[in-house]
Image: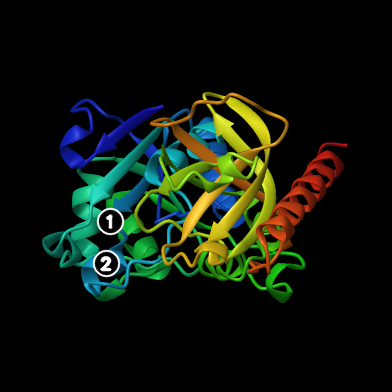
Amino acid sequence: MQRWRGLEDIPQDWGRSVVTIGSYDGVHRGHQLIVGRAVERARELGVPAVVVTFDPHPSEVVRPGSHPPLLAPHHRRAELMAALGVDAVLILPFTTEFSKLSPADFVAKVLVDKLHARLVVEGPNFRFGHKAAGNVEFLAEQGATYDFEVEVIDLKVSGNAGGGAPFSSTLTRTLVAEGDVEGAAEILGRPHRVEGVVVRGAQRGRELGFPTANVETLPHTAIPADGVYAGWLHVNGEAMPAAISVGTNPQFDGTERTVEAYAIDRVGLDLYGLHVAVDFLAFVRGMSKFDSLEQLVEAIANDVKRSRELIEACEA
């Protein structure tokens, strides 16, 4: 799959293509419906499927300081898009100048001049251009002028998560923030993932007999509510069952929120400096401060036992 950053990266001889546009944070099941349909139509038409997305999130430019927590960094989104069969991902730097493009100029400069769109696939609430003035109706009008079709995909509801509300990144972020990682997974179609480099912490876990990987998460990452979770620690392509702690470490009066993963039944791991990923499978318990270190160690042992059970149940 090709990855382009900016319009100038698009090959000069790029032909016609099927295009879909959006932030696509999380590439959740609603996104998968749209992107999957774009890929399907691209195969039917014999042209490439292109996803257009933005960096940073448009809200950060339009309303500085309002950047939403991210469900997936761009490289992860690209991996998920590639798995869906996308041929190219175009990341457009979203600047103040770019935000002032009218809907008509966006269509002309991006969809027509550079991507030579044959078909554009979007959800019903798609908005684009300056002040989000463009919608799917306007896009269809532009398609009649510039010889491309527009197909609108209705998003299905998200089952039990969020009370059956439509698939959305906003709902997923809310569920993650509340610690409902199972509800988030129902919308995402997979466990919520947090990534980062393993850094040295206070090493108290090692002293207590449960050495953890202290993950320095990427900026704006959507981190679950404080508590203990069962999940997986991904290192160099290997997924290891893990008990995961999120919080400020109240037992030792900590103030900084951290994500720490204990690889169950693994010893002698040296992960410092490695980029790792942590998948959140299920909530185990809330964060607590215990009366003694002995009680803390007992609680951690129980957390590991419960995490192992939840992971084994998932794999069965």
- The quadrant of the picture occupied by the C terminus is top right
**Toward the viewer: 23 or 115?**
23
The quarter of the displayed image where residue 313 is located: top right
**Toward the viewer: 37 or 185?**
185
Q: Residues at badges 2 and 1 in contact (C-beta under 8 Å)?
A: yes
Which structural element holds mark 1? loop
**Toward the viewer: 18 or 2?**
2
The amino acid type found where label 1 is placed reads Pro
Relative image position of residue 186 (x, y in whole percent): 70, 57
- Left/right placement of residue 222 relative to residue 5 reads right
The amino acid type found where label 2 is placed reads Glu
Q: Name the residue under label 1.
A: 56
Residue drawn 58% across the image and 48% down it: 32
For residue 19, say whether it is visible: yes
Q: Name the residue under label 2.
A: 60
Residue drawn 63% across the image and 45% down it: 208
Relative image position of residue 18 (x, y in whole percent): 42, 41
- Left/right placement of residue 233 relative to residue 50 reads right
